[in-house]
Image (spheres, grey):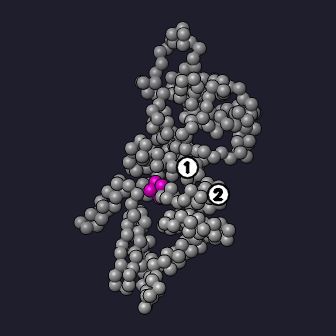
Amino acid sequence: MAAKKGLGKGLDSLIAPKAADAKPAQAAPQEAAKPVSEHAADAVMMDINKVEPNRDQPRKKFDEDALNDLADSIKQFGVLQPLLVQERDDYYEIIAGERRWRAAKKAGIKQLPVIIKKLTEQEIMEISLIENIQREDLNPIEEALAYKRLLTEFNLKQDEVADRVSKSRTTITNSMRLLKLSEKVQQMVIDDKLTTGHVRPLISVEDEEQQIMLAEKIFDEKLSVRDAERLVKNLQTEKKAKPDEKKALDPQLLAVYQDLEEQMKRILGTKVSINHKDEKQGRLEIEYYSQDELDRIIDLLRTVQR
């Protein structure tokens, strides 16, 4: 299957040859034994024990069955695609290809092909993220954490992150919203107990214990995504209702408010809540998760005003 448009381009732009990477054609005698790879076309064979994973790479969980299958293939055909590595003080750090390295270890391979590059920490992070997204190897929480790191540690804007991974800005924002979930609920997503569709409604539940209780109920009762949404919506409706209310809000008007919320969510690309006091008064809430996101929403509202 062809790589998604934009992703391959982004990866190529990061690992393409650079003048700063170039090595002299003839190394000095004291450097003759050091493996050298000038560009992506030059792979060298390296002792597998000299290669180590990148501790900061986005992907933390590897499927053991899939690794065993890849190890069986490597036993027959070897490592067909070189790993991308960066030289450190006394070892070579994997930038892309940790899954192949793990499988090669299982297969008992002593040497494997590598391409040696000199990259910045940001480029290493971007390449690791792009490679994993291309292969759909990251779980939703790992992906969200990777986006957050690019935004906070490397000071990229959401537009820049979206461009690098060929995803919409809204997708990046919605992904990072998963990090508002409690750690226990995040772990349920990592363990494939719940999908992102199941847990997205829980983001609006501020009480952590209640959030966990709802997540466990969704899992235990095998609720559908729609059932999960309905469960949270009913809880919020009950919470908004006051015990001394003389007259409940008209169900038809409530349905209208819910429809308006959904329309505004699609337009603004973020969570919108209509909190009604009665049939005539209420409060409109629009959520944002960064200064960049706030600027985008304001620009949209100004466009509507004009």
Nearest the viewer among 38 and 268 is 268
Q: Is residue 189 visible?
A: no
Quarter location, residue 107: top right
Q: Main secondary structure of the magenta part?
A: helix
Tag 1: residue type?
Glu
Which residue is more in the foreground, 9 or 199? 199
Residue at image x 46%, y 49%? 148
Residue 175 magenta-drawn?
yes
Say which residue label 2 marks.
192
Cα separation between marks 2 and 1 = 13 Å
In the rendered image, residue 264, in percent from the top left (x then y), is placed at 39, 70
Question: Residue under circle 1?
Answer: 142
- Dot 2 or dot 1: first in sequence order is 1
- Residue type (three-letter) at the residue carrying disc 2: Asp
* Quarter of the image with the C terminus in it: bottom left
Q: Secondary structure at mark 1?
A: helix
Q: Residues within 10 Å of mark 1 (few under 14, many from 20)?
A: many
Residue 94 within the magenta-colored segment of the rendering: no
Residue drawn at 59 percent across, 14 percent down:
33
Residue in the image at 53% along x and 76% along y: 235
